[in-house]
Image (tube, rainbow, N blue to C red):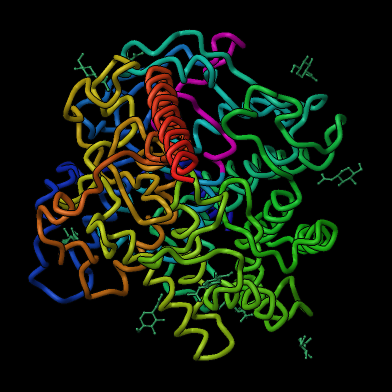
Amino acid sequence: MLRLSFLVSALPAVLSQLALPTTPFLPPSASNGAQASSQSGIPNTQWTTLLGNLIYFYDAQRSGNLSVPGTNNRVPWRNSSAMDDGKDVGLDLSGGYYDAGDYIKATYPLSFTLMSLCWGAIDYGKGYDLANQTAYLDSMLRWGLDWMIKAHPSPSTLYVLVGSTDLDNAYWGGDQNIPTNRPSYAINDTKPGTDAAASASAAFSACAALYSNRGFNGSYSTPASLHDDTYAQTLLTHAQQLYTFAVNATGGQKTYQSSVPAVGDAYGSSGFGDDLTIAALFLAWASSSPTYYQQAQQYFQQYNLNKQNGVFNWDSKTPGIYVLFAQIAQSSSTFGAGENLSTWQTTCESYFDAIVNNDSGAFLTNDGLLYYNGDSDDATLNPALNAAMLLSRYAPIASTSDRKASYAKFAQSQLDYVLGKNSMSVPYIVGSNPNSPANPHSAMASGGDDIGNINTSPPQEAYVLYGAVVGGPDKHDRFFDIRSDWPETEVALDYNAPMLTLAAMHVLNDTNDPFYTALQPGAYAKVKPSGQPCDNAISDGCGGTKLSKGAIIALAVVLTVVGLIILGLLIWYIRLRMTRK
Ligand SMILES: *[C@@H]1O[C@H](CO)[C@@H](O)[C@H](O)[C@H]1NC(C)=O
Ligand SMILES: *[C@@H]1O[C@H](CO)[C@@H](O)[C@H](O)[C@H]1NC(C)=O
Ligand SMILES: *[C@@H]1O[C@H](CO)[C@@H](O)[C@H](O)[C@H]1NC(C)=O
Ligand SMILES: *[C@@H]1O[C@H](CO)[C@@H](O)[C@H](O)[C@H]1NC(C)=O
Ligand SMILES: *[C@@H]1O[C@H](CO)[C@@H](O)[C@H](O)[C@H]1NC(C)=O
Ligand SMILES: *[C@@H]1O[C@H](CO)[C@@H](O)[C@H](O)[C@H]1NC(C)=O
Ligand SMILES: *[C@@H]1O[C@H](CO)[C@@H](O)[C@H](O)[C@H]1NC(C)=O
Ligand SMILES: *[C@@H]1O[C@H](CO)[C@@H](O)[C@H](O)[C@H]1NC(C)=O
Ligand SMILES: *[C@@H]1O[C@H](CO)[C@@H](O)[C@H](O)[C@H]1NC(C)=O
């Protein structure tokens, strides 16, 4: 026994990051996505390629030193950048990911993204394995998590933003000239942020569960093969500390923008009850703790999370909480005892039935995209993709075969839409097909540095931002593909997240190609809308009172002249009649 334990402790303590393939996976040219795949087995290579591209997008978003041995920068046009992040506060906060088409690093949406990705890799992990993408998944997750660890330098300090949203919006250019004034903003014990701390905790817990190979019963596959208990333990420690910070900060419980107003512009949060609940729930799952589980139940009651019908996104986790409760009810024999799967089925199904039966407050566009007024306005695809992801995940758990079928069907309709089954014939993933968006709103990929002429300088986007899910078309299903039109063309870490989970699921279960292989090259060019959009970036297409001053004066002159002529004619007519009398 003694010798055995000696041997065990002599084994390498750290089973570290998986080795990346010596011949890297690189996205094929978009024309590859116009060819129906020849084989019909599992995995379907169009799906495995799509999954690879979706991960590759995160490589393109990397900040920090891209030349560290073992990280293999696969994106030839990306350079190391923002190496001095954190110096203003005496820390190394280099690394992590740029949030979207600009250069801020924002912890709250990153936390949601990592939580969502790890959850997906727990449920559909074998999809990553089958696609030979697990090493890239591992590398991608660690690039985010290792940065979050740096951003959490003490139990009650979490950096929530690096870079100023004001300064950043004033810069459009490559990764070599990013303005160096990049302040670091933290929440702490006296200036807390319950939502941001809890959300970061949830990301660490979900990923700890993944790295400790903790799948759900009744799940569709095993977690992705990146089991690493040492790393999982590190993640769990951060999760526990952040949860305590969220719950017990001296400064009380409050939204993080009330402590750090600088985050308000980009990523203010609408509340923290959902964050506390999902943090407690994932912590319960990752650490097999009935105590955390009971706290999740308490928060669920306290914040009235039952019977909500909103979206699932970085600011709103409630629908995900329903599904996670159901998955745990189906899985745990150590806690949630007395918790009853049918209770959570009722909760989930009241939410999903409303979506599927057009009773959720959202509506379907003419082409069938699920649209929430407000939440969908600045990125139409995100609410629909998140709904499709949750519906797909929940469908096998549903209480009746009708529901299993209708949920799966609705999810498929949203996925198909995003992959090109729409009147534009556009698959909304850059570089996946010849009809894909060509002008993603990404300062890095555009190759331009003239903020006054984003659309034309340069005329063609310099680099193809493979695998990026864009904001999406407008509520009339029109897509203009204009670089400055950020609601339609911007890319973001959280936009991609549900698509990875859906792709991993389809890798392991779908013999059919993604919809876009059926599209004719050039199909979009034939139907591309003329004119301009009407949204929060571009209002030229809104119609109405968009006349110039000169035009208004000219119009006034014309109207006056016409009025005088009519008046003259009227007087002439009256006099004529009077003389006839
Ligand atoms: C990145 O890391 C490598 C290896 O540690 C080092 O040689 C290089 O100087 C670093 N690059 C930057 C920009 O700091
Ligand atoms: C994954 O790797 C295996 C072994 O090298 C290979 O046989 C298989 O074709 C690869 N699959 C994909 C989708 O690349
Ligand atoms: C990276 O550096 C190269 C060489 O200076 C440059 O051509 C390229 O545009 C840079 N990439 C970005 C995203 O700015
Ligand atoms: C928390 O941060 C604020 C600045 O936002 C600072 O004034 C305060 O001293 C910090 N509190 C602690 C406990 O570090
Ligand atoms: C995979 O497909 C089968 C047959 O269509 C279905 O029964 C099963 O629920 C699917 N699994 C997942 C994860 O969707
Ligand atoms: C919060 O503080 C109370 C009182 O010290 C303690 O009992 C509780 O465990 C703490 N909560 C967490 C989540 O750490
Ligand atoms: C989940 O699976 C584990 C391991 O197979 C088993 O011990 C446990 O009873 C299952 N839980 C439920 C609720 O079925
Ligand atoms: C589960 O809940 C249902 C309905 O809420 C109830 O009828 C059933 O008795 C409960 N089962 C257990 C084991 O608590
Ligand atoms: C969905 O419901 C809305 C009202 O909430 C209604 O205007 C719309 O026509 C309905 N759509 C369909 C397809 O029934």
In the rendered image, residue 101 lying in the magenta stretch gets the answer: yes
Q: Which quadrant of the structure image shows residue 33?
A: bottom left
Relative to 204, 15 lies left or right = left
> Residue sitting at 46 percent across and 32 percent down?
567
Coordinates of residue 528 in the picture (x, y in percent)? 21, 49
Tell me, yes or no, if residue 28 can be seen here: yes
Q: Residue at x 30, y 14 (%)?
A: 450
On the image, the x and y values in percent for residue 501 come to 41, 59
Left or right, 328 with reference to 42: right
Give the percent coordinates (x, y) of residue 568.
43, 30
364, above or below 60, in the image: below
Instruction: Using the image as rendered, state which of residue 493 and residue 128 is in the foreground.
Output: 493
x 38%, y 26%: residue: 558
| Rendering coords of residue 60 (x, y %) | 31, 34
Q: Is residue 37 above or below residue 345?
A: above
The stretch drawn in magenta includes residue 125: no
Residue visible at 41% across and 21% down?
Answer: 557
**Number of marks:** 0
* Residue closest to the eye, 552 or 122: 552
Q: Quadrant of residue 262?
A: top right
- Return the residue found at the far bottom: 401
Residue stretch in magenta: 86-111
Horizontally, residue 218 falls left or right of residue 237, namely left
Question: In which quadrant will I find the N terminus?
Answer: bottom right
Helix, strand or loop for the magenta stretch, by majority:
loop
Q: Is residue 573 above or below residue 353?
A: above
Residue 142 visible in the picture: no
Front position in the image: 281 or 385: 385
Q: Nearer the viewer, residue 413 or 573?
A: 573
